[in-house]
Amino acid sequence: MGPFLKLSHGIDWFNNQIGSLIRWLVLAAVLISATNAIVRKAFNISSNAYLEIQWYLFAAVFMLGAGYAFLRNVHVRIDFISSKLSKRTNTIIDIVGIVVFLMPLCIILITLGWPIFYNGWVSNEMSQNAGGLIRWPAYLLVPLGFSLLLAQAVSELIKRVAFLRGDIAEPMSVEPGKSDEELLAEELAAEAERHLQATQKAVSVHDRSVKPNGVK
């Protein structure tokens, strides 16, 4: 399994880099959207190109991020069922899902999406909206996104088979757990609690210091 695990590690590294890139795409989409809204409201100026680039970036985040989401194990699971099963049973279910459903779906959509991209690229198809953008970059996101997802499916399949063989200790790179949002909310709640306790302590000290002598 050594060469396969090296392949899995390489795929994981690549999709992790894509995930880092996606963060910048989100920032770009937010900045463009905010700027477009401000200019439209303040100066009554609008551009279809700026509107469409927002759609392109939004689509890119979801299409290119599918493989990264699989790597990070943040896709939807039926927790009330999976939590009652052993790790080995969940791993076998994952393998069946990857081989029977996910990989064939990716191959079908890549096969269907590539000709649409190629035709749009060759014809230099443009948006029907005045001042709009060329269409082939948006078409490319479909085969490219599902290619990244297919590659990650191969990586996850390798890791799960290696786990069943006893070659690795865990069947996935990231164990299911609390989301980043939940962890952030807990951190903020803990910080607020510490701040409240510090405030109450300061008030208590102040009250004691201002009491007249002899007053208990």
Image (tube, rainbow, N blue to C red):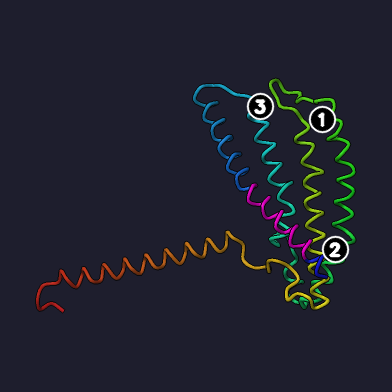
Residue drawn at the location 49% of the way across and 25% of the way down: 42
Which region shows up in magenta?
6-21
Residue drawn at the location 39% of the way across and 68% of the way down: 194
Look at label 1 and name its amino acid: Trp
215 relative to 112 in the view: left or right: left
Residue 116 lies in magenta, yes or no?
no
Mark drawn on residue 49: 3
Q: Secondary structure at mark 2?
A: helix
Mark drawn on residue 97: 2
In which quadrant of the rendered image does the N terminus lie?
Answer: bottom right
- Mark 1 or mark 3: name the one nearer the start of the chain: 3
- Mark 2 or mark 1: name the one nearer the start of the chain: 2
- Mark 3 or mark 2: name the one nearer the start of the chain: 3
Residue 88 place in picture, x, y as percent: 80, 76
Measure the C-alpha gap from mark 1 to mark 3: 18 Å
Mark 1 burial class by Cα count in 10 Å: few <14, some 14-19, many 20+: some
In this rendering, the label closer to the viewer, 2 or 1: 1
Residue 204 place in picture, x, y as percent: 25, 71
Q: Secondary structure at mark 1?
A: helix
As rendered, which of 128 and 3 lies closer to the eye?
Answer: 3
How would you classify the magenta stretch by its main secondary structure?
helix
Look at label 3 and name its amino acid: Ala
Residue 76 place in picture, x, y as percent: 73, 60
Mark drawn on residue 121: 1
Residue 7 lies in magenta, yes or no?
yes
Q: Secondary structure at mark 3?
A: helix
Marks 2 and 1: CB-CB under 8 Å? no
Mark 3 burial class by Cα count in 10 Å: few <14, some 14-19, many 20+: some
In this rendering, the label closer to the viewer, 1 or 3: 1
99 relative to 216 in the view: left or right: right
Q: Quadrant of residue 12?
A: bottom right
Residue drawn at the location 74% of the way across and 27% of the way down: 134
